[in-house]
Amino acid sequence: MVKVGLLGCGTVGSGVVKLLEQNRDIIAQRAGEEIVLHKVLDRDVEKCRRLGIASAKIAADVEEILKDEEIDIVVELIGGVEPACSYVLEAISQGKHVVSANKDLIAVKGREILEAAEANRVDFYYEASVGGGIPVIYPLKQSLAANRIKEVIGILNGTTNYMLTKMSREGLNYEQVLKEAQELGYAEADPTSDVEGLDAARKIAILSSIAFNSRITLDDVYVEGITRITPTDIKYAAELGYVIKLLAIAKEDEEGQVEVRVNPAFIPADHPLAGVNDVFNAVFVKGDAVGDVMHYGRGAGQMPTASAVVGDIIEIVRNMRSGCNSRLGCTCYTEKKVLKIEDTKSRFYIRMSVVDRPGVLAGIAGIFGNNNVSIAAVVQKEGGEMAELILITHEVKEKDLRKSLQEIKELPTVKDIGNVIRLEGIDKE
Amino acid sequence: MVKVGLLGCGTVGSGVVKLLEQNRDIIAQRAGEEIVLHKVLDRDVEKCRRLGIASAKIAADVEEILKDEEIDIVVELIGGVEPACSYVLEAISQGKHVVSANKDLIAVKGREILEAAEANRVDFYYEASVGGGIPVIYPLKQSLAANRIKEVIGILNGTTNYMLTKMSREGLNYEQVLKEAQELGYAEADPTSDVEGLDAARKIAILSSIAFNSRITLDDVYVEGITRITPTDIKYAAELGYVIKLLAIAKEDEEGQVEVRVNPAFIPADHPLAGVNDVFNAVFVKGDAVGDVMHYGRGAGQMPTASAVVGDIIEIVRNMRSGCNSRLGCTCYTEKKVLKIEDTKSRFYIRMSVVDRPGVLAGIAGIFGNNNVSIAAVVQKEGGEMAELILITHEVKEKDLRKSLQEIKELPTVKDIGNVIRLEGIDKE
């Protein structure tokens, strides 16, 4: 019998308690041994009681779990970097295996924790930290391990995906859908972490570390959120055959340099990620052998996330039974250079308001030309005295684009640069 | 250094040779040890030479590989049940680990092989047998292990998916798209295994065995192919908001009885599987905790399949290094009852030609009613003297539907029952 100690019994923690109970029989069969909840720590003792947890199992403090020699596996569902990090490291030093769903922690302290686990010959598993219940981390580490991973593109935040889907379908603006998402409980009162892309940034830091075998931390990720996306951009995207998604992107170039960023992007309407709507998440992986694969499902929620946590527990028990914990170890073998955003290359959509007069486009095109920005398509929308100009560039250096836009902004014929959005998921020109 | 012996150096085998060479560095890093091809067996010795395999590595017969004590892992890519089965069992009895992409073998002899592997404490891995390079088998065994799997629905055959996609997009008929698929090399000269659903049947036998922890063999799978699908059915499907796909379906009901079948089916146009087009494959899994997850990618082809094979080799090497081979073992713990097709329940689309005259529908509806077949929707298409009647049923027992149709066929007002196709992927009524 394997005994689990649970730190944090909020939404996901309660799901873990329920799932261990509800599927006790098949979990035992598949793990090869019965798995029981031994102790739970949560500030809200009443909630633990309501979940049917016996008083004897409710810990008074964290040490009661970390120091309990009967506990084999600690499940950390507290969230945040501290004190979670200290608890996890102490559990590891006590020879306990750890399962965590804590993206904040892993995106910042992943390497340290994985190395500590390896040194102590214990497992640290974290499938639930990215994409809720969708299997993404272990497929990358295992079934896809023969590939040089070229690209990982994820829709990793359900809140913003719900909002963008709603904006696309109903033509609503950002403020309207945010309000609705908050009313439905999909967005928090302070939505910053979701809408500014920080949640997705943590997840792509975790995935890219595995994909590229190099530790990428949150600080390495360039981040733009969705707050500036307008119904107009969504409409033009549709007219041009694209949809707008908040994408978490990690790429490695031929020289082994990586770029990792989160930004709203145009993707072709027939790209597999374009059909990922509402609160669903997906991770699209391009490997040199496997080509394109995608994993899709619910990226959050009580039971999907609990599914990943308990899946990890089962794997750890199998390892315990075979005496091979830490068989996967820390997989950051290299230190790859992370490109600054200025040095990355992308294709861009640019929307600007210009005076509707001959020669205006020539002036703009001249500036782009002088800065090595090549234009692939131009659409001009009439609108009285002012016209709206939509440009799609070929692949350009971000630096060159920014310099062009700086100069274009100064043109007396250009009233306003409405938005600039990258294009993704298009095969190389 | 781990040494691999390769049985069969056809398309996939050549891919494995290439991939082991091309990604030698990262494969060694991820496996923790260098992996080298030690010996290759193939009838076509010249082809082996053209791949750059040294003469000393080309085996004269199978025993030269199976008896070579230096070989740790045997990769079986011969295909077919025999002699592959004997070779695999001999390799296992010699204490060698085996990787196989052979769906024919596993769908028939899976249990025997897995039990032999467990008894000999060696690994038998087979990710490549289903869905090419898409990670499907190990996610089911590992990350999703905490779930009671309710349903697995796959698009598991690229040839038929290409053909149905083509029929949908271009209104072509079955014979036309088959010819085109053959010209492109997507379909074989004798397309039976693909178009009659046998290839998909083997794959769903493998997946359902894992999902339900019960050994399901090819004989347990009810199979219908796509040869009777017409442009008319595809057109009506679209009008009603569906697309037609060849689906491999496995479900477990509340009583623990399973149904496993391959048949063309209507699925709602907004179902994630509906967007899986051309030669792509996908596996859609419904778990009681995780909800819906889907894995998508190229289900066949040289390098995608080699990706899965080498991924398995890497996992086996990790197990060897940690001394925990056979940690997953045989996972068929139970013997679940497989329902006969007559006892399964589905919703159906029925297309029939009837005389266009008052009272005809009443007669048909009466027969359905008497047999407990409840009709959800009826569309009648005018066509001169004859009318085309399209019916969609609620969920009914297959047995009851068949009896009704038997009786309806006898009606003088019914000229012909054009087609009967199941509906899938619709949430329970």
Image (cartoon, coloured by chain):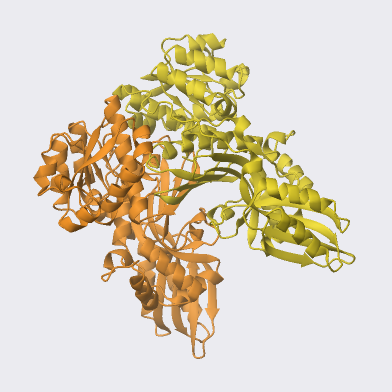
Chain colours: A yellow, B orange
Q: Is residue A75 visible?
A: no
The percent coordinates of residue A8 (x first, y second) are 57, 21
Q: Residue at x 38, y 20 (%)?
A: A2
Q: Is residue A128 left or right of residue B61?
A: right
Give the answer, above or below, for where A144 lies relative to A209: below
Residue furthest toward the bottom?
B385
Give the answer, above or below, for where B395 lies relative to B128: below
Quarter where residue B167 is shown: bottom left
The percent coordinates of residue A121 (x first, y second) are 38, 18
Give the answer, above or below, for where A88 lies relative to B338: above
Q: Is residue B342 left or right of residue A44?
A: left
Q: Is residue A49 left or right of residue A38?
A: right
Quadrant location of the N terminus of chain A? Answer: top left
Q: Residue at x 75, y 55 (%)?
A: A231
Give whichever of B154, B135 is nearer the camera: B135
The percent coordinates of residue A43 (x first, y second) are 62, 17
Q: Residue at x 57, y 40 (%)?
A: A259
Quadrant location of the C terminus of chain A? Answer: bottom right
Give whichever of A221, B405 is nearer the camera: A221
Q: Residue at x 42, y 9 (%)?
A: A69
The percent coordinates of residue A229 (x first, y second) are 74, 49
